[in-house]
Image (cartoon, helix red, strand yellow):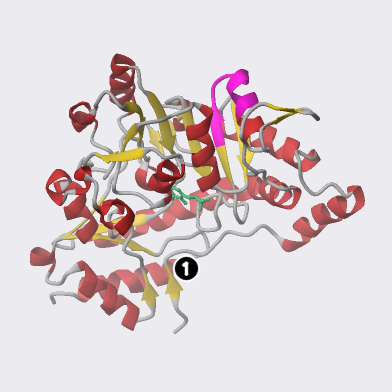
């Protein structure tokens, strides 16, 4: 049997890509906001339903630049249940992460626990829309407004997600996307910052190009985080297919739910009504006692059958050596995250995953405890 991995990147038809590459070879513009970059940026803003978007070479540099854009300093409240880049972006800015626990339904930052973690040094909140499920955006904004804090969303999982027809990316001061190969929408590597006014977009665009404002003026110690023309052309093509790709993910997600709904000790997340989802992952949560096997044992069993899921997110960011010493990393401060990280297992999901493979995976899971 061929191995089935947790994900597989979506690729556009090669012939269509080579057509675009020919144009790049003809015009000899490879980077620095060329024609494909301009076209892709506009097309993406239209597709996502946002006013201003700035393209980046990857999501991590976009996160680092987002913090620079708003001159965030001191302490930032964030979640331990994310990809490590969320917190690394703070570290690279010399900011102290303060971990707050997640809520049990979606593993997103628990808005009810934010206030207790605010100190005079707190300048911002950086929540993550984990697995594409929206954070409690209204509650978070209320707290931010009351305490004068900025909100930067790590929206790397949330490409295309909408709440009641409005893009999730329109909440907070800034949102950051990743277009890494493993994401719902990819430009091989890539990322973006979404902002809500032209002035901020101008600052972001300076910062991602060494701080250059025109030919001679440097207005800030910027970085080099530009998306190039090959990535932009690739992205422009991907955009044509992404809705179809999300539709295929949806079918897989629904089949998993149907087949696994009566497995004791296994739960999955159900989307809130009014949310247009993007189905980036299919996490299940294993309660060892009722299921009859631990999450790690299930992982081993699946591997022995050539199914490679992923324990994502595990370990918690707060458990990595860089962050473990922080007071807020104490497991007693993060009971829900500590529980979820031990239970979570992401099953394979990608547009080209065969439904017969989904069935085989579910049969194996259902054989446990029988
Ligand atoms: C993928 C991801 C990132 C990092 O994005 P890159 O494009 O890989 O640098 C950051 N945060 C989260 C939640 C992610 O999933």
Pointer 1 local density, CA inside 10 Å: few below 14, some 14–19, many at least 20: few
Which residue is depicted at the point 24% across and 46% down?
A: 326
Q: Is mark 1 within 8 Å of ligand 1?
A: no
Name the quarter where the C terminus is drawn: bottom left
Pick the residue in front: 47 or 172: 172
Which residue is depicted at the point 69% across and 51% down?
A: 231
Which residue is depicted at the point 30% across and 51% down?
A: 323
Question: Percent x, y for residue 212?
Answer: 71, 31
Pick the residue in front: 12 or 83: 83
Which residue appears farthest toward the right when viewing the image?
26
Which residue appears farthest toward the left when viewing the image?
289
Task: Decide if residue 45 is in sight here.
Answer: no
Residues in magenta?
Answer: 193-203
Is 304 one of the magenta-colored residues? no
Question: Percent x, y for residue 23?
Answer: 86, 50
Which residue is depicted at the point 64% across and 45% down?
A: 239
Q: Seen in the image, is 89 located left or right of residue 124? A: right
Q: Quadrant of residue 35?
A: top right
Q: Quadrant of residue 195?
A: top right
Q: Seen in the image, is 34 located left or right of residue 318? A: right
Question: Percent x, y for residue 328?
Answer: 21, 43
Is 201 one of the magenta-colored residues? yes
* Residue carrying label 1: 354
**Does residue 164 sit above or below 83 in this rendering?**
above
**Does residue 282 sit above or below 278 in this rendering?**
below
Task: Decide if residue 35 is in sight here.
Answer: yes
**Does residue 369 sit above or below 206 in this rendering?**
below
> Could you tell me which secondary element the residue under label 1 belongs to?
loop
Q: Quadrant of residue 148?
A: top left
Question: Percent x, y for residue 100?
Answer: 23, 39
């Amino acid at each position: 049997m061929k191995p089935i991995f947790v994900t597989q990147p979506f690729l556009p038809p090669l012939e269509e890509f080579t057509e675009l590459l020919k144009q790049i070879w003809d015009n000899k513009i490879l980077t620095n906001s060329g024609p494909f970059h301009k076209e892709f940026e506009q097309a993406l803003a239209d597709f996502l339903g946002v006013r201003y978007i700035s393209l980046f070479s990857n999501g991590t540099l976009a996160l680092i630049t987002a913090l620079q854009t708003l001159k965030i300093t001191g302490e930032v409240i964030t979640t331990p249940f994310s990809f490590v880049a969320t917190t690394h972006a703070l570290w690279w800015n010399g900011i102290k992460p303060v971990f707050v626990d997640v809520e049990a339904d979606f593993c997103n930052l628990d808005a009810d626990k934010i206030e207790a973690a605010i100190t005079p040094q707190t300048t911002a909140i950086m929540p993550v829309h984990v697995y594409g499920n929206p954070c409690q955006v209204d509650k978070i904004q209320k707290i931010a407004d009351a305490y004068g804090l900025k909100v930067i969303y790590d929206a790397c999982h949330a490409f295309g997600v909408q709440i009641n027809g409005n893009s999730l990316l329109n909440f907070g001061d800034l949102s950051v996307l990743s277009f890494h190969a493993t994401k719902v929408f990819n430009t091989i590597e890539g990322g973006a910052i979404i902002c809500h006014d032209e002035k901020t977009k101008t600052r972001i665009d300076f910062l991602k190009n060494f701080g250059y404002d025109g030919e001679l003026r440097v207005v800030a110690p910027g970085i080099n985080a530009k998306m190039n023309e090959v990535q932009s052309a690739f992205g422009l093509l991907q955009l044509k297919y992404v809705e179809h790709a999300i539709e295929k993910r949806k079918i897989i997600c629904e089949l998993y739910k149907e087949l696994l709904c009566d497995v004791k000790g296994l739960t999955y997340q159900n989307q809130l009504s009014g949310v247009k989802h993007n189905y980036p992952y299919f996490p299940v949560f294993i309660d060892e006692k009722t299921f009859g096997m631990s999450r790690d044992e299930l992982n081993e069993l699946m591997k022995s059958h050539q199914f490679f899921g992923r324990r994502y997110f595990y370990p918690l960011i707060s458990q990595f050596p860089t962050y473990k010493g922080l007071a807020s990393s104490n497991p007693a401060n993060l009971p829900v995250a500590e529980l979820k990280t031990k239970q979570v297992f992401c099953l394979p999901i990608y547009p080209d995953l065969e439904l017969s493979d989904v069935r085989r995976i579910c049969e194996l899971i259902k054989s446990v405890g029988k």
